[in-house]
Image: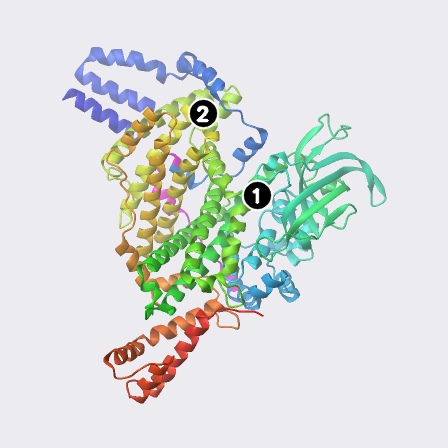
Amino acid sequence: MTAAIFAVVILLLLYNRASLKVFTLSIFVLLCFYSLFYAVIFLILALPFNITQIREQMFSRLILVLFKKQMPPISETEKAAIDAGDIWWEAALFTGMPDFTQLLAYPKPALSLEEQTFIDQEVRILCDMIDDWQITSTGEIPENVWQFIKNNGFFSLIIPKAYGGKEFSALAHSEVLARLATRSLSMAATVSVPNSLGPGELLLHYGTPEQKDYYLPRLAKGEEIPCFALTSPEAGSDAGSIPDTGLVCRGEFEGKTVIGLKLNWDKRYITLAPVATLLGLAFKLYDPEQLLSDKIDRGITCALIPVNLPGITIGRRHLPLNMAFPNGPTQGENVFVPLSFIIGGEQMIGQGWQMLVECLSAGRALSLPSLATGGAKAGTFASFAYAHIRKQFDQPIGYFGGVEEALIRMAGFTYIIESARIFTAGAVDLGLKPSVPSAIIKYHATELSRKVSLDAMDIHGGKGICLGPHNYLGRFYQGVPVAITVEGANILTRTLMIFGQGAMRAHPYLLTELDAAQKNDLARFDKAIFGHCGFILSNIVRTIILKLTRGYSNLSAPKGKLRRYYQHITRLSSAFALSADLSLILLGGRLKRLEKLSGRLADVLSMLYLTSAILKRYSDGHTEDEKLLLDWSCKYLLNYLEKQLSDFWKNYPNQILGFFMRKLIFPFGIASYPPSDQHGHEIAKNLLNPGTLHELFKQGLFLQPSPGNLLADLETTLIKCVQTEEIEHRIKHALKSGEIHKIKLDDDLMHARDAGIITEAEFMQVNDARISRRTIIAVDDFI
């Protein structure tokens, strides 16, 4: 009985993460009731761990020596990436004990009146001007569209009003891009670049006052078209190895001899380069004559280069899968510029990589996720409408189980992407540069968007694959791989960035341990390493208890109909934290090279983040039937999470430990079940017909009837088909009973009118709906 009491107390203390002193005092008091002798012995043994100076000398000093031997080498490029950006909700997930009051306390992202007006007016007008087939067929954006974009501030969404910009929130920035993407991915990509990683953002954060005063007003008015040149033929994902150079030397500029930079570069895949007037350039700077300091290698540096300088080659184009946004190479040979062209001036020499990864943390959270969301929303909306309009075997194809299955996936994936987009934009609006969340949403928004595009093409069949002015899917399908490739290729993002950077930045102790070890700071290392030990012990206990109780032991989870999801996140967060810790300790630097393993841990962290985003969105306000989508999405994500975590331990190098950990985390197998077929059927039934869920997916789409707006035509035709279903049912019944006959197309309609089965008004109504339906399902042909 006494042993059981001790066990319960110890487990409760570890489960609730009692401090070392509280743990020691609690056990001491408990022992006093049992045996004063044992209590004194325990206190003598425990005191060295509780007195910092003794603990440091007896234990931490030796651990520090061993730790430094095992510590993986970290390059300057990696260190800059690790140090860049801010931690946010992902850090709470890494603790194994997330505080959901913190999650629910984040402000609900919302548009200002000015931002909403811009979307309702300027964005609507631009959408109406866009003819995506013309743009992608000619490869050119019409001059009147270019002028409208420049005149109305589409290139200045992030520029402060003091410089003539819009100074919009991250949410508004994202909404503009998502809305444009529903109309044209090429146009959305064109608008996104000046508002993402590029001269504008770099100037905002790092530019000198003189640079800001000169360039930002010109960028805001569209007088300068910016691009940023980073990628080289020999340096793609490994941007830190760029071969492009700048040499500090004396040279002539505007008739004066000055100290400046002689630049040589060869860049490719640079969006807006063919039309740019201002080139942001990343290069390695060398000072061979030591004109600026005694250092020769000064590191990666960024500069702003007007493209009209001698030695610059620009204007040729790539053709990224028929997308029409300007993209191409640029080269520079012995281009001389003064030191004042360095972004931020001389003091920012060598800070280029840090500047880039910090700005990318914010830009990557908005641009591509917004484009992916817009494309997915348009594809999903179109597919549900088409699946009702298109008939085979005398019924809408959406009623067939195989088509329904694809439609359900599309709805769920789009809901996940949209929730994560809003959630992450909220982080940026809090003033953060969320490096890990931006990698999570970039990867999963584009990957889920790819799956949506594949399902949309399957549902549309021949309608989807025949390109032409009446095809609203083809360019979305073609454009998805572009989003997957740029701003960090997805394979790299998953295997190296999400978990690799996440483990360093978001782990409560690891980065402190590494930094203290590098600086030989024994006091900081001691505090971190013993905190880490308690953290691991706590997660072992929490993982076991939370698993055995299926999360019900998390009594602090928010109450309400979402409570079980919060409890599941806590249960799996604890298992993730334990898995990550054990792997980092046992595999060390090897884990970075075991990318299939680190990729699975990245998936686990991502699923926790995405599920949190859905719960946050729903808690901020929801429609009547939205719970159907929330349940499907959360069940899908949690089931996938558990599969990935199980597979992680199945493939662990130490098979014995892997077997033991699977039994510890999954003693009864995977506990989170995927959504049922019936659950999905309820979603499909709601989305195939106008209703609250249908309205939810219409949000953010350009549905104003106008020539060439195919999504608006789909919506109009869907309504016509729904409104005539009862009439069509009467006609169908008359055919089956033999009251009327049908030989040629639409004979049944005329015979039904002549037989008095339908009225003249109903005849006209059905005839109009059938004409609209045939227009929608028609495909283009060419000479």
Q: Residues within 10 Å of mark 2 (few under 14, many from 20)?
A: some
The residue that label 1 is drawn on is 359
> Which residues, given as a range, are shown in magenta?
94-117
Q: In the figure, is residue 557 to the left or right of 107?
A: left
- The quadrant holding residue 189 is bottom right
Look at the image and say whether residue 97 sits in the magenta stretch: yes
- Residue 732 appears in the picture as rendered: yes
Q: Position of residue 611 (x, y in %)?
A: 36, 46
Q: In the figure, is residue 519 to the left or right of 545?
A: right
Q: Position of residue 361 (x, y in %)?
A: 53, 43
Query: Coloured how?
Result: rainbow
Q: Which mark is residue 743?
A: none
Disc 2 from disc 1: Cα separation: 29 Å
Q: Position of residue 2 (x, y in %)?
A: 16, 20
The residue that label 2 is drawn on is 588
Q: SS class of the residue under badge 2?
A: loop
Q: Residue at x 62, y 45 (%)?
A: 202
Q: Amino acid at mark 1?
A: Cys
- The quadrant holding residue 207 is top right
Q: SS class of the residue under badge 1?
A: helix
Q: Residues within 10 Å of mark 1 (few under 14, many from 20)?
A: many
- Residue 169 appears in the picture as rendered: no
Q: Give the residue furthest to the front.
A: 743
Image quadrant containing the N terminus:
top left
Q: Amino acid at mark 2?
A: Gly
Look at the image and say whether residue 679 sits in the magenta stretch: no
Q: Residue at x 63, y 48 (%)?
A: 270
Q: In the figure, is residue 672 to the left or right of 705?
A: left
Q: Position of residue 75 (x, y in %)?
A: 57, 28
Image quadrant containing the C terminus:
bottom right
